[in-house]
Image (tube, grey):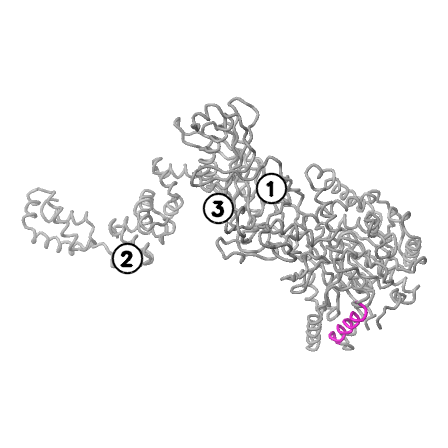
Amino acid sequence: MSLTYEDVIAKYEPVLGLEVHCELNTNSKMFCGCSTIFGAEPNTQTCPVCLALPGALPVVNEKAIESTIKIGLALNCSIAPFSRFARKNYFYPDMPKNFQISQYDEPICVNGYVDVEIETEEGPKKFRVEIERVHMEEDTGKSLHVGGATGRIHGAEYSLLDYNRAGIPLVEIVTKIVPGTGKYAPEVAKAYVAELRDILRSLGVSDVKMEQGSLRCDANVSLRLIGAEKLGTRSETKNVNSLRSVERAVRGEMIRHAELLNKGERVVQETRHFQEESGLTRSGRSKEQAEDYRYFPEPDLVPVEPDAAWIEELRAQLPERPSVHRKRLQEEWSVPDKEMAAMINADLLDTVEATVILGSDPTKARSWWLGEISRIANEQNVSVKELAITPTDVAEIVALVAKGELTDKLARQVVEGVIAGEGKPAAVISARGIKVVNDDSALMAAIEKACAEQPETAEKVRNGHLPAAGALIGAIMKETKGQADAARVRELLLGHLGQA
Amino acid sequence: MIRKSAAEMANALAQGAITSVALTQLHFNRIASVDKDVHAFLHLDTDGALAQAAAVDAKRAKGEKLSPLAGVPLALKDVLAQKGIPTTCGSKILEGWRPPYDSTVVSNLKKNDIVILGKTNMDEFAMGSSTENSAYGPTHNPWDLARIPGGSGGGSAASLAAFEAPLAIGTDTGGSIRQPAAVTGTVGVKPTYGGVSRYGLVAFSSSLDQAGPCARTVLDAALLHEAIAGHDPKDATSINAPVPQVVAAAKSADVKGMKIGVVKELNGDGYQPGVRARFEESLELLAKAGAEIVEVSCPNFEYALAAYYLIAPSEASSNLARFDAMRYGLRVGDIDGASAEEVMKLTREVGFGREVKCRIILGTYALSSGYYDAYYGSAQKVRTLITQDFTNAFAKADVLVSPTCPTTAFKIGEKSDDPLAMYLNDIATIPVNMAGIGGMSLPSGIADEDGLPVGFQIMSPVMKDERMYSVGAALEAALLGTWGAPILSKAPALGGVA
């Protein structure tokens, strides 16, 4: 007998806590010069430092510090004038040093917040998610367990280790506890991660690809009886690899906790692994007994003491916040909510914006990207951004249509040609011989020919029966291979038949 | 020739009196005749050294400009990575490991065309004061083969005293360069922390470790110091400043008007009479040479040893975690069905020696939650107090001095069962590491009661390393005047033919 979500929220108040790990997109690793490119052959992006060979020493990647400060500033944090790296000690085969260089009690950014907005039945609702800290650390390598049924270490025949990921710069963003979201907890969690993703993307510091693991979310959830002060026991759900999963994981955990509590059982403090297929979580590592990581300041590194002037310089360079930016664009372009949402959901807002910046009319740009181009992408089963057409191409095509050098129909052919890899719009136009026939004498010849071939139809038009003109226009367009401007053809035809 | 100083050898090479190949071969011959008794070396790179020597000779023949020590042989402590050459740190756990890279010290040696003969013995992972903790057997003191050569760098010091090499590299975490120098009648210098790159130095205690020069004269140590020192972008703790002018200081040997502070707390009870007598004599000689002797007090030094034995093991417990059989070195118990965790455990059980395990356990305990503040945290506070003591003392004196260690070389096995007695040997050297300043030990004579060499320690402020060289060279010159010949000439002849 399982509980409904309504049963849960009628009795309990959920409390959230979200930890997001974000891989920075620096060219080199956190503490050595190795490349960070995703998907290379295993163990080809390693060196004495990230393999922890005896004697090798870490050196901090300055770019990673800069990116982290930018993140802290964008999340309204204070930047610590003095922060330190610490060693987190534990043994694991995919962690070469058997300690992780992280930050412990002296993180680089503290005390920030992110405001998120969600849609509810009562209209949009705002929530403030407070940020406790943002700190830097290094990623571990990857273990591939072979031979077991589930890819888990238990039951595996052997394991393979890939240290390419070892030492990739990571930033961990930890919220304070988030109470007061009530029934909206799952949506708030999702909206927070989405907002964070957009902010990180706007800063250009990370690829923020949840499916590739460059953005990873751990969702802490606990329940307490409505009105209670004391926090309930939390579970920490890992492996939540999409925005939708964040929402599902929180909702699922709320129901699971409530079922346990209703039966008088207790929630075990542990990590849980989210299962994408079922939307449920399975038990992971117990956290009942706090693990002792024997943190101490990393003696191989010097403290991070960013110059105040540098921080202000970075602050001045911060881009507009994505949510503010979106609101501004929507107003400037006078786009209805629904259309705006469509652009955002299709992940095409930045593409459309780029096209507009290049001089295109916003409505035209939107309609090309979300219409014809999305349709082709859909047909080819790829994402729009993978197609060989750029905002520059689209802006150029829109301009040609505006100047009357292309008709909408011809423009579609040009778009198709660009996507097919035939080159830039100008190249496609010249190679395919596409041009608008706007030579009136050539059109007149075609009009006269059509009228001569369909004298009865021409007569009807001459007598004022205008709908009959369609058949003539069709013939004229065919004669001019579709390269004529239909409006001009109609104008000339009606003039010719005394109906102008 | 092998009894000459490195500077003299360099001179002979420059004048064409000998080739580097011949000089290198002479040292290999000496090693072949005496090292079975001394056991200073763990590995000899005969082919590599002779090839390096031949390359220097070729450069010289072409008239290329060479560095001051080009072609002079050197013994390298086995804690520094040298590409392709076994590097064991005196431990079974690294048996068979050949680094795929050069430590910065080694690349600096190679840049200066200094010929690397081989790797010297040491206490396992530099933990010890006698070289008895080496997994490959102890090194013997050339002054008395039944005695220890000091540690952890006993191999480097013994190789100098046995004329197997004119130069050596050591590393010093709590005295591992200076104490072996003291008990073998040689010169050893721990530069300012950050003065010489730690990149490729297998870490014992990262915040204390420092590589430095070992030699038979102060000038030789200075020449080697300048060859290996300097900023290294691969070591975040390396100091980005010009290398102190130590060669010029050693050559000037001038102490006129210098204030020399005698550290009150590093003398007295527990110091052997012969050690104290030689110390007093040296002070008189320095005064005669124009220095002003003053007394300074460093009241917090009495806590240095205790704090050291919390900080160093704590860092070691973390630094040594990487030896897990996964990527290099020894692997034990890798049989069907064994888990990675089981292999790690067995390898560490078999691969580490008793002293190393003892310190890993000590450090793990000191860092544990609930104990951190009481142990590691308090030790760091003591460290700050010691640094303040030095700052106050250096306000009154240009350099500070003390005996290097309380006693002369003890017998092999004598202190094996008494770790505290062993640890006490470093009581005068440890404060220097805690504060990151420079320290030198040079011979001040022979103790009357046992006929063994005694060390004199000179300490200089951060990046003022040249001061200890000025004082050391001045004292060395004055002592040579009283002895009539270098102190090592008083050591008994070894079994081999010199």
Where residue B304 appears, as percent x and y from the top left, is: 80, 45
The earlier-in-sequence mark between 3 and 2 is: 3
Alpha carbon separation for disc pair 3 and 2: 54 Å
Residue type at tag 1: Ile
Alpha carbon separation for disc pair 2 and 1: 55 Å
Residue B467 seen in this snapshot: no
In the rendered image, the residue lying farthest to the right is: B448
The earlier-in-sequence mark between 1 and 3 is: 1
Q: Secondary structure at mark 2?
A: helix
In the rendered image, the residue lying farthest to the top is: A227
Q: Secondary structure at mark 1?
A: loop
For the residue carrying disc 1, how many other residues have a C-alpha within 10 Å: few (<14), some (14-19), or many (20+)? many
The residue tagged 1 is: A108
Where residue B448 appears, as percent x and y from the top left, is: 94, 58
Residue type at tag 3: Thr
Span colored in magenta: B19-35
> Which residue is at the front of the view, A358 or A51?
A51
The reply, left or right, for residue B69 in relation to residue A237 is right
The residue tagged 3 is: A150
Observer-side mark, 3 or 2, equals 3
The reply, left or right, for residue B448 in relation to residue B109 is right
The residue tagged 2 is: A429
Quadrant of the rendered image containing residue A291: top right
Quadrant of the rendered image containing residue A419: bottom left
Indicate whether A381 appears above or below A340.
below
The earlier-in-sequence mark between 2 and 1 is: 1
Indicate whether A295 appears above or below B293.
above
